[in-house]
Each structure stands twice: as C-alpha cells, then as structure tokens.
Amino acid sequence: MNKIITIFLLTSSISYAEDLMKIGQNIFYNKEACVNCHILNAADGGNNQLSKEHVINIVTNGYGVMPAYKNKLTKEEIEAVATYVSTEGKNWKNKLSSFVQ
C-alpha cells in the first residue's frame, strides 16, 4: 500500500512540474511575450543564473525598466514563469538578456 501511495505522489508531482513548465513557457513566449524584451542575447554567456525566488520577486515587483506583473498575472502564473526561466535559463547560453541583473 505504501508503495502505491509513493508512486502516486511521485507521478502527481512530476505531472505538476511538467504542467508548471508548460504554463511558464506559454507565458514567456505567448501570453505576456516576455521574449520580446528578453531577446535572449546576454553578454555573460548565461553565467548569471537566477534562482526561482529571485525571478518571482522580479516578475512580481518589477526591476529597473521592467514593470511589475503582480496585477497582470496570478501568483500561480508568476510561479510558473519563474520556474520556467530559472530551469530553462540554465540551458540558454548567451541567451538570457535583461534577466541578468
């Protein structure tokens, strides 16, 4: 019985993580079109990796010329896009522009 519960919980968390990434990717490329400003050409070669918590703070409250999205996106959407950026950004060598702050 414990193995069944463990497998269910593991499967559920994997599915949730995949869904979160898909939602975050959709927000980044489509819904809010973050990619339009974050043109993916960082001078640091992708060396400055931001944590999920840092990205959540930036997206929620804004930073520099980037506006706050706390009134445009739900907390769940902010978490999703932060998860996407902090996870996929590690693979974006020379691609993460103004997120590098």
Image: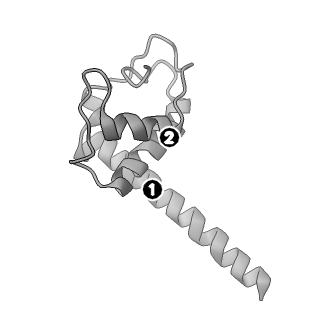
Quadrant into which the C terminus falls: top left
Secondary structure type for disc 1: helix
Three-letter amino acid code at the position of disc 1: Leu
Q: Viewer-proximal residue, 65 or 11?
A: 65
Check disc 2: other Cα within 10 Å, few if <14, some if 14-19, many if 20+: few
Q: Please report the residue visible at 43 percent of the width from the left and 43 percent of the height from the top.
A: 82
User: Picture coordinates of residue 84 (x, y %)?
Assistant: 45, 44
Q: Residues within 10 Å of mark 1 (few under 14, many from 20)?
A: many
Task: Name which residue type carries label 2.
Answer: Glu
Q: Are marks 1 and 2 in contact (CB under 8 Å)?
A: no
Is 8 left or right of 69, judged from the image as shown?
right
Decide which of 56, 27 is in the foreground and name it.
56
Instruction: Name which residue lies at 46% across and 51% down.
Output: 21
- Could you give the CA–CA distance between mark 1 and mark 2, rounded to whole angstroms? 15 Å
Task: Please state the horizontal and vertical placement of residue 55, each as a whole percent of the image.
Answer: 44, 36
Q: Which residue matches tag 2?
A: 53
Reading the image, the residue beneath label 1 is: 20
Q: Nearer the viewer, residue 84 or 77?
A: 77
Q: Residue at x 42, y 41 (%)?
A: 56
List x then y, in percent, for residue 47.
Answer: 57, 19
- Residue 89: which disc? none
Image quadrant where residue 68 sits: top left
- Element marked by disc 2: helix
Which circle's residue, 1 or 2, is located before the other in the chain? 1
